[in-house]
Structure formats: structure tokens, C-alpha cells
Image (cartoon, rainbow, N blue to C red):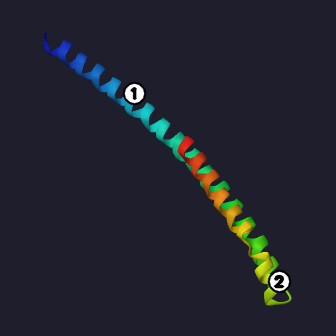
Amino acid sequence: MNQDQITAKLSQISNKGLEATFSLSEAALENAQKLAELHYAASKDVLINAQAGIQQVLTAKDPKQVTEIVTVDSFQASGNQAVAYQKKQSIA
């Protein structure tokens, strides 16, 4: 094998390495974008639900009404939302 053949072979190997690196980088960016979208959607949902709950508590007339608003069901809904988020995250 002469010097030109060695140089050509090294160039070919280098190009394949760059192609693989580019492909992996593209896949990583796509997954990062999906994960960012998932985080955004989950954060938005949590904030909307929290805002609604806080608004109900702030408009309550007495402490009894607050305890009726803050029930086990409201905590269960938050738990269900967290579980759904985790499931989506493990898929993405």
C-alpha cells in the first residue's frame, strides 16, 4: 500500500466517523426537543391546575370551605398527573 492509498483510506475512515457523529447528534437533538416539549406541556398543565386551585382557595369565604376545596381527590388528581407525565417521559 503506497502513501496515496493510505491517505485515501484514512480519509474514508474519517468521513464515515463524521457521518456517524452527525447522525448521532441529529438523533440526540430530536430527542432533546421531544423532551423539552414534554416538559413544557407538563409544566403548563401543572401551572394551570395550580392556578385554578389557588383561585378557589383565595375566593373561599371561610376555613371550612377551604378544607372542602383541598380534598384527597384534588391530591389524587395531582398524583395521577405526575404518573401520566412519568409514563410519557419514559416513552420519549
Q: Nearer the viewer, mark 2 or mark 1?
A: 2
The circle drawn on residue 65 is: 2
77 vs 32: above or below: below
Q: Quadrant of residue 91?
A: top right
- Residue 42 image point, x, y percent: 65, 57
Q: Amino acid at mark 1?
A: Glu
Quadrant for the C terminus, please.
Answer: top right
In-image side of 20 versus 80 (left or right): left
- Residue 62 image point, x, y percent: 83, 90
Query: Badges 2 and 1: C-beta atoms under 8 Å apart?
Result: no
Q: Secondary structure at mark 2?
A: helix
Q: Secondary structure at mark 1?
A: helix
Distance (Cα) linking label 2 and label 1: 63 Å
Q: Amino acid at mark 2?
A: Gln
- Residue 22 image point, x, y percent: 42, 33
66 vs 73: above or below: below
- Residue 68 image point, x, y percent: 80, 78
Category of crowding for the residue at label 1, using alpha-carbon neighbours closer than 10 angstroms: few (below 14), some (14–19), many (at least 20): few
Residue found at x 68% / y 68%: 75
- Residue 39 in sight here: yes
Of 76 and 91, nearer the camera is: 76
In-image side of 24 versus 79 (left or right): left
Q: Quadrant of residue 79?
A: bottom right
Residue found at x 71% / y 61%: 77
34 vs 10: above or below: below
In-image side of 79 versus 68 (left or right): left
Residue found at x 23% / y 22%: 10
Mark 2 or mark 1, earlier in chain: 1
Of 77 and 13, nearer the camera is: 77
Category of crowding for the residue at label 2, using alpha-carbon neighbours closer than 10 angstroms: few (below 14), some (14–19), many (at least 20): few
The circle drawn on residue 19 is: 1
- Residue 92 in sight here: no
